[in-house]
Image (tube, helix red, strand yellow):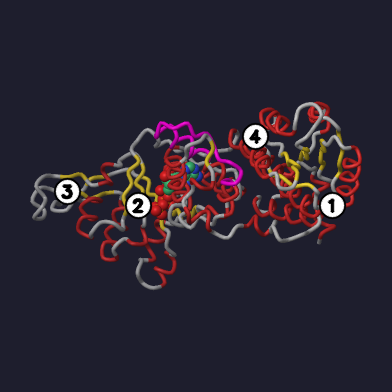
Amino acid sequence: MKASILIIEDDRDMCDMLSVALGRRGFSAVAYQSGMSGLAAIDSGQPDVILVDINLPDINGMEVCQRVSADTPDLPVVVMTAFGNMDMAIEAIRAGAYDFITKPVDMDMLALALDRAVQYRMLHKQLTVLSRAAETAPNLDCMIGESQVMRELFQRLTKIADTGISVLITGESGAGKEVAARALHNLSRRKQQPFVAINCSTLTETLLESELFGHVKGAFTDACSDRKGLFQEADGGTLFLDEIADFPLSLQPKLLRVIEERRVRPIGTNSEYPFDVRILAATNRDIEAAVAAGEFREDLFYRLNVITAQVPPLRERGADRLLLAARFISDCSARQGKQVTGIDKAAAKKILNYSWPGNVRELRNAMEHAVALADHQLITPEDLPEKITSQHHLLESVYHPADLVSLEEMTNRYINYILGVTEGNQSLAAQILEIDRKTLYRRLNKSS
Ligand SMILES: Nc1ncnc2c1ncn2[C@@H]1O[C@H](COP(=O)(O)OP(=O)(O)OP(=O)(O)O)[C@@H](O)[C@H]1O
């Protein structure tokens, strides 16, 4: 599909020259000789970019910029100004122009500017599709996700939620293992009962033992009163053992016995109390390696790992990054009393291209940071933590300013980029690119 350029230029010879030269470079161009006629043709022509001269017989190029950015803000305008007239160029950018080019026009530079503008337009369309998707995302409880990997996880969690069996939730730090555990609880018949979570890696062995199993007054030096353990606190509900791979080896036999017998004996007493608790455990470590190394008991591992649910890292969730970012921005904005409503295109690119080693937690913190710094409605790259903006960008593998490639090549690169973002999902890629699937298959076959 050729990118279409709507030229507004009063000099007829210049119009013809531009139309022919752009046609040769793979664009489709139509020209109008006045600002008003050009503006009137936007609706019917559906151009990808407007190329406008500053001096026109009726309204000038600056006004064209203002009107386009007010009516169709996603339609980029490239302005042509006389050489040396930098003030005018700056003013045009202020009026909403996407870029400018000086006259006499260097066709290579113009083609480059138009390619960039087309790319901007494509990205904007992609964002529109994504924000529409955000409204209808198939969330599970509080878990947001649209990507194939998250849909598969949601299906698995939904299937096992009400079975009562023990689930081992695996995944990198910050990926959402606790959110998955809460979803399992909230989707089960235990949802009205307590959900109790404990992090097994942060407490000393003695404290962990007393937290989990409880104690009676005088059981040890600091035991000034009776204290119910978490198994009893969670009675009827769910107990979530986070960072289970760090559970002390010496306490593991006791934990196994309690889980198997469904009875707990607080420290310092001979009385046992029955409980009815569903056990969920999570780890970001390779627990099987810990079993192999003798650091984790095999029998306890099998008891906890009746079924596994793996939470994928954020970098494998394609466009979910933007869905999550949008949600966090709206939450943070409300909390901080700000009017930030979204992300601009440049910041969205950064979010898509960063690898998010700290997963969803890192994304949430980054959005909190960005909302705090933003002094406009949309978050810009400057508002994001530097780590995110300085990482190598995938989109730069699509477009290098020094790279004079054909539109055909650029289109192929962009299609591959979008396929990367959609994790190879061709239907979603076709939807984002706004081409039908057959056209996408044809292009992929042609370029392979
Ligand atoms: N799919 C999701 N949708 C919305 N919020 C999410 C999602 N996944 C994670 N979060 C949010 O990200 C943060 C980290 O999630 P969570 O604590 O569940 O991660 P974790 O994998 O348990 O981390 P850790 O390994 O450090 O225990 C939380 O604020 C959580 O609410």
Which mark sits nearer the N-terminus, 4 or 3? 4
Q: Is residue 391 left or right of residue 262?
A: right
> Horizontal and vertical percent for residue 181?
43, 46
Residue 364 shows which numbered tag? none
Q: What's the CA distance linking mark 4 and mark 3?
A: 78 Å
Which mark sits nearer the N-terminus, 1 or 4? 4
Q: Nearer the viewer, mark 2 or mark 1?
A: 1
- Specify whether residue 58 is in view: yes
**Relative to the observer, which residue lies in front, 413 or 390?**
390
Q: Nearer the viewer, mark 1 or mark 3?
A: 1
Q: Is residue 111 left or right of residue 250?
A: right
Q: Of the residues shown, which amino acid type is indicated by label 4?
A: Ala
Which mark sits nearer the N-terminus, 2 or 4? 4
Q: What's the CA distance linking mark 2 and mark 1?
A: 51 Å
> Horizontal and vertical percent for residue 46?
80, 34
Residue that badge 2 annotates: 241
Residue 271 shows which numbered tag? 3
Residue 442 shows which numbered tag? 1
Helix, strand or loop for disc 1: helix
> Horizontal and vertical percent for residue 167?
44, 51
Q: Nearer the viewer, mark 1 or mark 4?
A: 4
Q: What's the CA distance linking mark 2 and mark 3?
A: 24 Å
Q: Is residue 107 left or right of residue 399?
A: right
Which mark sits nearer the N-terminus, 2 or 1? 2
